[in-house]
Each structure stands twice: as C-alpha cells, then as structure tokens.
Amino acid sequence: MKQLSLFLVLVSLYSTAQVVRVEPQNFSSIYSFGGNGSFNDNEIAIIGYDALLPAGIPKTYLFNMASEITANGFLNSPEPNQNFAGSIEMTNDYLFVGSTANDTNVTNGGAVYVYKKVSGNWQYLLKLQPPTQSENDRFGSNIAFHDNQLFVTASGYDSNGSSTVNNGGVYHYYLSSNDTFSFVQIMTGNQSDFGFGDLLDFENNMMVTTSDGDITDTVYTYKQGDVSWLLFNAIQMPVFTSSNVNVLASNRVSFSNNKLYLYHLDEIPNWPTFNGKKIKIYDWSDAQLQWNFSEDFYFQDGDYYEYKVKVRGNNMYLIPVGWYFLLIERKNPVFHYKFDGASWNYFDSYTGMSTVTNDSFGYFTVAKGNKALFGNVQEHWSFMALPPNGGAYMLDNTLDTNEFVNQNIILFPNPTNGIISIASTNSELAQVQLYDCLGKLVKIQNSNFDTIDLSNLSSGIYFCKITDNFGELEIKKIIKK
C-alpha cells in the first residue's frame, strides 16, 4: 500500500505540465458536471445539471480560454422538456449538442441541436433529426465534425427498427454554405454487435470506428469517396485471455498519425508484477488496404488492468477505466506519454483536485492538437451523502512540447540487458535515483554518472530520477529486459 502510494506521488510531483480545473459559477450547486464536453481554439462547453436530480435540468456550460479559464454563462435546451443528454462537439463556428432522450418524433428517438457563432455569441440554428426514427434510437449519442461534414451516432439504431436491439449507426451529413446539413448515408456494423459508432476518430480522408461483440470486437476503417465514406477494412481485436478484464471496444482503440493504437493485455501475471499491459501499434497500408502490426508498446503504471487509450499527435493518454488489483481507494489517474520521434516515454500523470477518492478522472477525454479536456463526473466537492458535483480539467501541452523534445539527458540503450549509459548535453549531474514500478527506491548513485548498472535487478519497468547541480530534474523510464 505504501509502495503504491509512493508511486502515485512520484509521478505527480516530478512533472512539468499542469491541468487547470474548469469551474462553473456556483459549482457547489451544480451536479454531474463533466459527463460530456468539448472545446475549440478559445472556448469550452460542458454539460451539467443545475440542481439535484430529479429536479435538476441539464445545461451546456460555457467557458472562455485565454490567460485563464473563465465561466461564460450557459445554454438551455431550445425545446421545453427536451433536455441536453448526449454528446457535444464544438468547432470554432458551430456547436452541436445531443439530446438522446428527445421524443418529438418517437420516444428516445434523439436529436442534435445546432448552434452557430454569430457576433461572438452562440445562437440556436436548427434541430437535426433523421426523417425516420425508431423508438430508443438515441440519435446524438456521439458527434464528430470533420472536413465540413457532420457525423452523428444513434447508439440504439437497428436497421430493422427494433426498440430493444442496439447495434448502433452513424449518420453522415454534408454542411453547405447556407448552413444546411444534407443527409448522405448511414453506416452500420455487424448486425450481431452493439456499440457501433461509439468511437469516431478521423485523420485526413480516413475514419475509424468500432463495435462490441459477444466474443470479439471489431475495428472498421473507412475512406472518403467522392460523396460517401466507403468501408475498406474490418479487423477483429485480440481477445483478452482473462474473463476478469472487460474494456469497451471504443475505449481500447485510438487512431492518429496514420496509426492504429489498440490496448491489449497479455495473460495476467502473478502478483506483484504488472507486466503484460501494452498498446499494440499498427500501420495502415494503402497498397494492401489493411492494418499491419508494427510494434507493442509495453507500459506498467499502477495496478490497473483495464484502460482507455487516446492518442493525438505526440501525446498518448492512458486512462484506467475498471477495477484495480489492490482495491485500495485512490484518486483515478490519467497517465500521459509523449513521443520523442523514436519512442513513447512517460511524461506525467494527472488527477482531480478534490479530496475525495474513487472519482472518475478521464470519464470522457477529448484531445485536439496539443490540448486535452478530461471529465470527472464522479468528483465530490460537497457532502458525500449528496450526488457528485462533478468536474472537468483542461490540459495544454503547447508550452511543454519544446521542453520535452529538448530534454538534455539521454539514456541508451533503452530497453537494456543490464548496463545503460547516460549522456548529458549541458548539465552536470548530482544524483541518480532508480525506482521500480511501485515507487520503491531500488538504487541511488551520487557519483560515476556515465552508466547505471541494472544487472542485478529483475526484468521490468523502472523510473530514473536524474537531478543536476542546479536542482533541476528529469524523469526517464527504463525497460530492463
């Protein structure tokens, strides 16, 4: 227990990036804040309830991003008794808010409210619904905007119109210059699966989505045609060997850098080791129209076995989403890795700011460019007997990028069989400390900084804390083969 706590403290203290809490006015009277949200270059939008349920009404709370994050009011649902309750997508010009329980057509048919930025203010533009809906379609459960096209998931969609089958479907619209959204197509997955469209990841002319099956989950890859999007590839994900591990397909997969990142777990090893957790990385081949396995990126953060992965550019976020081995209450972390041009390296970890443990930091994670928004809908700021107020946090990596790339200490070879060399470009080193994955100090050097000898240590992942004569430090991850 002490070792695990030390590890979590270690990865929090020796870091450079910081998350900033997104706090609405009168936050203590707002509940379930951070269930969903989005942002653009200058603003943030997050859903929360204005009072305790069942009296509470969901609103879309708005925030400005400048030198600091400030509350900027909220939006009410444009229709009485048809509340916000779905996904949010925010661009610089448009704001899309889902209303999955909207019953203006059929019960829980769903809708998407569209707002447009006019003279600096969001003005309600229109309501978007398919012309034909079935009960419990829940149109608006996921929303994405890419290349002047809108994609809306209906999580309860079934091609036969069943109100109890939840295969899921993705509606595709083109946006014209006169603010008209023209329906193009609906995309669907395997008829025996569910959750199709819960993930919508885009890059250039490619889209990746997933579905969950009884035994195997599927990754679908679409490419844009002249008008519609065409299915080019469907692959099944590797199956977890342990029945105790269960992660939604939409959480396991992320698409960025023309690569597919897929969380997997080798057979659960015996305690106290937690090796086996990895991100399987695939490269897309246009010639073969398929994903080709490239490498496994192993990581060993904490005692968790179920993760969500989100990658954007050089930033990878690994978010525990399920049970953990030690069953010790703690803040739920998000682990942040950065790509240095050759490999992924541990960079930082983040948690919520309330004093209450067992929250849901990373409940939703929206990453755009060098920024990421994390929801924390189970965060408590008032009495524990009351429902959670919730929370949300913004991370801006822009100022950290050069600092990370230009770090002046290099460890090689890494991974290593035993001896690892240290190269420092412009610093004299004062101390080297080596910690195992549980935060236990296993080695300390106050001199002879050319190499570190790991020959007597077990195989696994270690964190090397390097301090120079000016008191500045860097944290490096070392893999011992």
Image: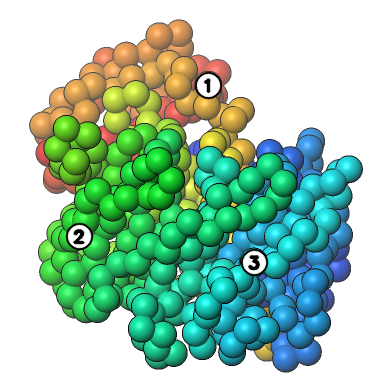
Residue located at (24% from left, 63% from top)? 218
Q: Are marks 1 and 2 in contact (CB under 8 Å)?
A: no
Q: Residues within 10 Å of mark 2 (few under 14, many from 20)?
A: some
Q: Quadrant of residue 1?
A: bottom left
Is residue 134 in view from this perspective? yes
Is residue 437 in view from this perspective? no
Residue located at (64% from left, 66% from top)? 128
Q: Any mark on residue 128, and which?
A: 3
Residue located at (55% from left, 50% from top)? 174
- Compare marks 2 and 3 and give the one earlier in the sequence: 3
Amino acid at dot 1: Asn
Residue located at (24% from left, 67% from top)? 217
In this rendered view, identify the residue nearer to me: 459 or 321: 321
Amino acid at dot 3: Leu
What quarter of the picture does the C terminus occupy? top left
Is residue 152 shown above or below 222? below
- Compare marks 1 and 2 and give the one earlier in the sequence: 2
The residue tagged 1 is 402
The residue tagged 2 is 237
Amino acid at dot 2: Met
Q: Position of residue 15 (x, y in %)?
A: 52, 38
Q: Nearer the viewer, mark 3 or mark 1?
A: 3
- Secondary element under disc 3, as helix, strand or loop, is strand
In this rendered view, identify the residue nearer to me: 257 or 423: 257
- Secondary element under disc 2, as helix, strand or loop, is loop
Q: CA distance from mark 3 to mark 1?
A: 42 Å
